[in-house]
Image (tube, rainbow, N blue to C red):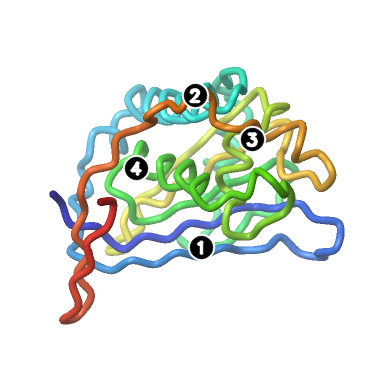
Amino acid sequence: MKLLHFYLTVCHLSHPALSQPQQVVTVTVAAPIPSDEPEWRDTDRFTSAVLNSTNTYRSQHGAADVAWNGTLASFADDYLDGGDCVFEHSGGPYGENLAMGYPNATASVEAWGDERDEYDFARQGFDEATGHFTQLVWGNTTDVGCARRLCGGSGWYLACEYWPRGNVEGQYEGSVGRREGGAAGLVRPRVVVIVGLVVCVLGL
């Protein structure tokens, strides 16, 4: 059992009817998380954590593994270094998922991937609540590159760039596969979230 930190996630969605990228924000408040988690501090562990968790979800939905792309990682790094921990999209040419405040890189990717529980596979298409997931497992995406930055009390800010970008309207049915074989997926621990005097038990 563990306490959740303050979480923020944002996905970059492509939709012909929208003039600007849409933001999806999820907030959970709890005790601060230490900033020295090895998955954040060590570059090799960071890269491995992102790839392993990303490709776990992709394999469960019939998508090929993505490879680490240094150009995408450099773009994400430049974007985070050029800002002041402002939580908004870069507006760049790639697919993009953002997260802030998660205890490690794996947990950040899990939060994106677990949006699949809300995705309607019977009526595939644009959905603000599941855009992280659909980009994560988008069949045509072959490359990912990510960067991270410590943003004080808000925790670690993660930016991942994807190419080719996903969430393209009219291509969901051929790009977002159903979960194969009833795989158990990544194990989510029992989590207690404390907000004020209200205690909620999640992940049961």
Picture coordinates of residue 180, whole percent (x, y): 54, 24
Q: Which mark is residue 87?
A: 1
In this rendering, position of residue 191 left or right of residue 55: left
Q: Which residue is mark 3?
A: 162
The secondary element bearing badge 1 is classed as loop
Q: Which residue is mark 2?
A: 55
Point out residue 148 in the picture as x, y percentages from the top left corner.
42, 43
Vertical side of 93 occupied by 38: above or below: above
- Image location of residue 190, percent across then percent down: 20, 49
Say which of marks 2 and 1 sits in front: 2
* Residue at image coords 43%, 60%: 8
Residue at 63%, 60% in the rendered image = 128
Task: Bin the neighbour count of mark 2 within 10 Å (Cα to Cα): few under 14, some 14-19, many 20 and up.
Answer: some
- The reply to whether discs 4 and 1 touch (Cβ–Cβ < 8 Å) is no
Of residue 187 and residue 8, the one placed in the foreground of this image is 187
The mark closer to the camera, 3 or 1, is: 3
Q: Amino acid at mark 4?
A: Ala
Mark 4, residue position = 107
Residue type, numbered disc 2: Asn
| Residue at the image position 72 percent from the left and 49 percent from the top | 123
The image position of residue 30, as x and y in percent, is: 22, 66
Q: Secondary structure at mark 2?
A: helix
**Disc 3 or disc 4, which is closer to the eye?**
4
Report, in whole angstroms, how far the alpha carbon at label 2 lies from the one at label 1: 26 Å
